[in-house]
Image: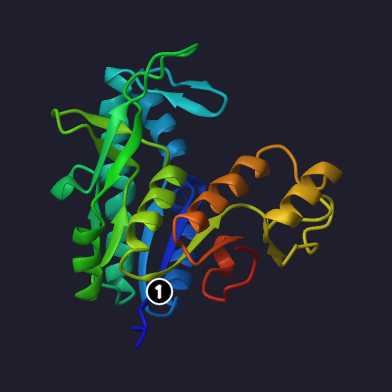
């Protein structure tokens, strides 16, 4: 007899949503309304850039990714692991959600390796090697909601700035061994659009065949291609469904379902 596994919803939200008071308040209400077990992964890049500037530290980006030198690492650790993470946790507690804020270094949750120097030296940036799904599952089964900041460690005493989308994807894969996982990536549109000029032209479901067809036709292009490729990799690794949607829709389950 097949055992029915608990459903787990993993939500990844960008920094823009969690850094503004009004949008954070809306997110906390919507996330609180998500049924069952859940986990939140957040960014915080704009706050890091702002505070770095106040400290006289220049932020350098290459293709939208932050170059993290030693001084920048201090800033992102303070902002992601402290200011942004704890504001979210405090807000969730106020909404009746028993949350715990974590980085990848806590309890050896997420181990990374420093990205090798190629055409660009990204500095203290981590590529995820291992997620300790058992520890996260133990929290979740106690009714505790993990809130993960985009910081990992190399188990040699170094923290590493790590892409929040990657953390969400790798965490979903690790937890697929314990739960029936739905991974939700939130961005500024309601889903993958068939017409970029029409915000309501959401494609409800995409499989590999449709992805290849829409890509060949130029309907899916640019930054949405790697997003969807990441989604298919998660599904291949056992994640039941990946949903691309707006943060305001997470408790409704609407958006584009990737399967």
The structure's colour scheme is rainbow
Give coordinates of residue 172: x percent, y percent. Answer: 40, 57
Give coordinates of residue 48: x percent, y percent. Answer: 39, 34
Give coordinates of residue 92: x percent, y percent. Answer: 32, 67
Q: As drawn, which residue projects farthest toward the front? A: 1
Badge 1 density bin: few <14, some 14–19, many ≥20, Cα 10 Å: some
On screen, 129 above or below 14? Answer: above
- Residue at left offset 59%, top offset 45%: 229
The quadrant of the picture occupied by the N terminus is: bottom left
Give coordinates of residue 243: x percent, y percent. Answer: 57, 62
- Residue at left offset 14%, top offset 28%: 156
Q: How many marks?
A: 1
Q: As drawn, which residue projects farthest toward the bottom? A: 1
On screen, 122 above or below 26? Answer: above
Q: Quick check: 161 left or right of 187?
A: left
**Front-lying residue, 165 or 147:** 165
- Residue at left offset 55%, top offset 56%: 186
Q: Quick check: 148 left or right of 257?
A: left
| SS label for mark 1 | helix
Q: What residue is shown with label 1?
A: 32
Q: Which image quadrant for residue 160? A: top left
On screen, 112 above or below 233? Answer: above
**Front-lying residue, 127 or 162:** 127
**Front-lying residue, 91 or 196:** 196
Q: Which image quadrant for residue 128? A: top left
Q: Quick check: 249 left or right of 218?
A: left
The quadrant of the picture occupied by the C terminus is: bottom right
- Residue at left offset 44%, top offset 53%: 18
């Amino acid at each position: 007899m097949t055992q029915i596994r608990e459903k787990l919803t993993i939500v990844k939200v960008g920094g823009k949503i969690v850094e503004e008071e009004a949008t954070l308040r809306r997110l906390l209400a919507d996330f609180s309304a998500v049924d069952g077990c859940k986990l939140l992964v957040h960014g915080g890049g704009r706050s890091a850039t702002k505070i770095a500037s106040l400290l006289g530290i220049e932020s350098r980006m290459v293709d939208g990714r932050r170059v993290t030198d030693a001084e920048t690492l201090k800033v992102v650790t303070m902002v992601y692991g402290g200011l942004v993470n704890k504001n979210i946790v405090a807000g969730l507690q106020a909404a009746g959600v028993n949350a715990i804020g974590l980085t990848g270094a806590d309890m050896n949750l997420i181990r990374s390796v420093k990205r090798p120097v190629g055409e660009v030296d990204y500095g203290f940036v981590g590529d995820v090697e291992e997620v300790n799904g058992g520890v996260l599952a133990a929290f979740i089964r106690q009714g505790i909601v993990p809130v993960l900041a985009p910081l990992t460690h190399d188990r040699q005493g170094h923290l590493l700035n790590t892409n929040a989308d990657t953390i969400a994807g790798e965490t979903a894969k690790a937890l697929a061994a314990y739960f029936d996982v739905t991974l939700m990536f939130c961005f500024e549109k309601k889903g993958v659009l068939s017409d970029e000029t029409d915000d309501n032209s959401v494609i409800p479901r995409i499989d590999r065949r449709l992805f290849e067809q829409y890509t060949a036709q130029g309907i899916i292009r640019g930054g949405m291609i790697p997003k969807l490729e990441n989604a298919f990799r998660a599904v291949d690794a056992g994640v039941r469904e990946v949903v691309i949607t707006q943060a305001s829709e997470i408790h409704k389950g609407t958006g584009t379902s990737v399967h």
